[in-house]
Amino acid sequence: MHHNVTQKECKRCGKCCIAGGPALHIEDRGLVVAGRLRPSDLVTLRRGEPAYDPVNRRVVFLEEEMIKLRGHGKIGACIFYDANGNSCAIYQWRPLECRVLKCWDTSDLEGVYMRNLLKRNHLIPEGSTLARLIKKYEEVLCIKHFASTLVDCSKGGGHVATKLQGHIDRDFAFRRAVIKDFSVPEEYLDFFFGRPLRDIIVPMIDDSGKLDHRNENE
């Protein structure tokens, strides 16, 4: 927990927004339903995939699914961050984590962190065409199998690297088919199906360019 007794209000420095978009919670569902947050603004991180944990400052395998506001630019700043004025384009409708965040005292944020997370099944009707597509994607491209291959690849073995590329190729083909056959906008895919597998691998690469399994969950 961070606590700065000398600071009492936001200085609008932009550091929090530059660090990336927040995770959404069930309380934020209304923002999506009302169209304040569009599918193209969101990205799903699937259960079991590697992701950076800002609290523990390491890469972990997620224990549950989460939906985040996507980042943009080289630094991955929140998509709604306006660097010109250090301001938020949706300040009036900002999500829960943004409302409770005080960089000088993170206790309120820690109180909601990884709790009551919003998931795709809270937004996509069960039995709908989209829900069936997501289920099929999870069957064909199980993130647990991909993560296991990542770990095996970090230990060496050319055949494992080939399997890894196979996962990435099937992922790409599935997404292309959805765009073609169902006219789904490409910018919606990261919300519906999660990050492309080729993007997931990035946090697993160490400074030497090799896969590193030291950050996996115990």
Image (cartoon, rainbow, N blue to C red):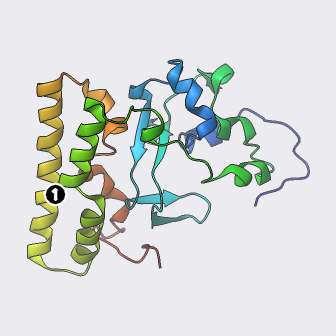
Percent across and percent down for residue 151 are: 29, 74
Image height of 10 relative to 66, above or below: above
Pick out the residue farthest to the front.
127
Q: Quadrant of residue 91?
A: top right
Q: Quadrant of residue 145?
A: bottom left
Percent across and percent down for residue 110 are: 71, 54
Dot 1: element: helix
Q: In which quarter of the image is the N terminus?
A: bottom right
Q: How many tags in the picture?
A: 1
Q: Which of 91 and 139 is in front in this view?
A: 139
Q: In which quarter of the image is residue 188?
A: top left
**Residue at 27% from the left image edge and 45% from the top image edge:** 135
Q: Is residue 45 left or right of residue 144?
A: right
Q: Is residue 82 visible?
A: no
Q: Is residue 27 left or right of residue 53?
A: right
**Residue at 56% from the left image edge and 46% from the top image edge:** 117
Q: Which amino acid does label 1 sit on?
A: His
Q: Which of 118 and 214 is in front in this view?
A: 118
**Residue at 29% from the left image edge and 59% from the top image edge:** 143
Q: Is residue 206 visible?
A: yes
Q: How many residues crowd mark 1 within 10 Å: few (<14), some (14–19), many (20+)? A: many
**Residue at 44% from the left image edge and 34% from the top image edge:** 42
Percent across and percent down for residue 57 are: 56, 64
Image height of 24 relative to 30, above or below: below
Q: Is residue 7 left or right of residue 1?
A: right
Q: Mark 1 points at which residue?
A: 167
Percent across and percent down for residue 170 are: 12, 50
Q: Nearer the viewer, residue 112 or 91?
A: 112
